[in-house]
Image (spheres, rainbow, N blue to C red):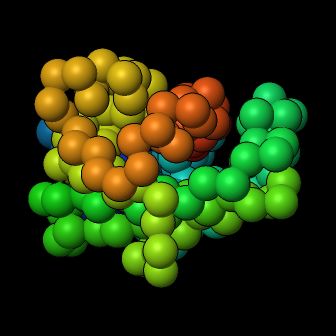
Amino acid sequence: REDRSVQDGLTTTFTVQGCRGGEPEHDRATGRALGTLPATIPTKGLPVATFLSDDHFLAAKEALAGDAGFQNSIANVDLAVQFDVTGAPDGDVSYYLSIADGAVDTDTGPLGDPDVTVTSDYATSVAISKGELNVQMAFMTGKIKVGGNMAKIMMHQTVLNDYARVLSGLD
């Protein structure tokens, strides 16, 4: 039987041989029944979307819309940020955060005319998304590069921190 596990944004498939869910597993040496595996393996507590996938961004949109703190931080904000992540498992990935008129959009792909572009490697992006590394520390240590309107990004640091906070709950 094949099962899937998601850890650190990576999906792993593993095979359990010699048993099927709902049927007793037996010790091969003694023949004694060891117990019954569930027909499905519970996934509670496991992330359901692979980091930077389309499903991840669908979950992100829902989480951002439902977070009162984030919604308060984007009031009267006009900001467009392009994120470019290098060295992801399936190649380089671009995604964006666009805020205007109290509405937010985040998704994969390039943004037409961003105010700011943030570039990082995959490991840094994962650490920020999990809340293990904050954006300011990543910038100060050179783990992210920022180009474009630096005054605008500095003015909206709270928005980026709230964005990272909400998305860290997805993993």
- Residue 59: image location, x then y, percent: 65, 57
Judged left or right of residue 88, residue 103 is right
Does 83 appear above or below 66? below
Judged left or right of residue 101, residue 111 is left
- Residue 150: image location, x then y, percent: 40, 41
Front in this rendered view, residue 144 or 130: 144
- Residue 106: image location, x then y, percent: 59, 63
Of the 4 image quadrants, the one containing the N terminus is bottom left
Task: Report which quarter residue 90 is drawn in.
Answer: bottom left
Residue in the image at 29% along x and 45% along y: 146
Front in this rendered view, residue 162 or 77: 77
Judged left or right of residue 28, residue 126 is right
Can residue 100 be seen from the camera position used here? Answer: yes
- Residue 148: image location, x then y, percent: 35, 54
Residue in the image at 23% along x and 39% along y: 144
Does 55 appear above or below 30? below
Front in this rendered view, residue 26 or 97: 97
Judged left or right of residue 81, residue 40 is right
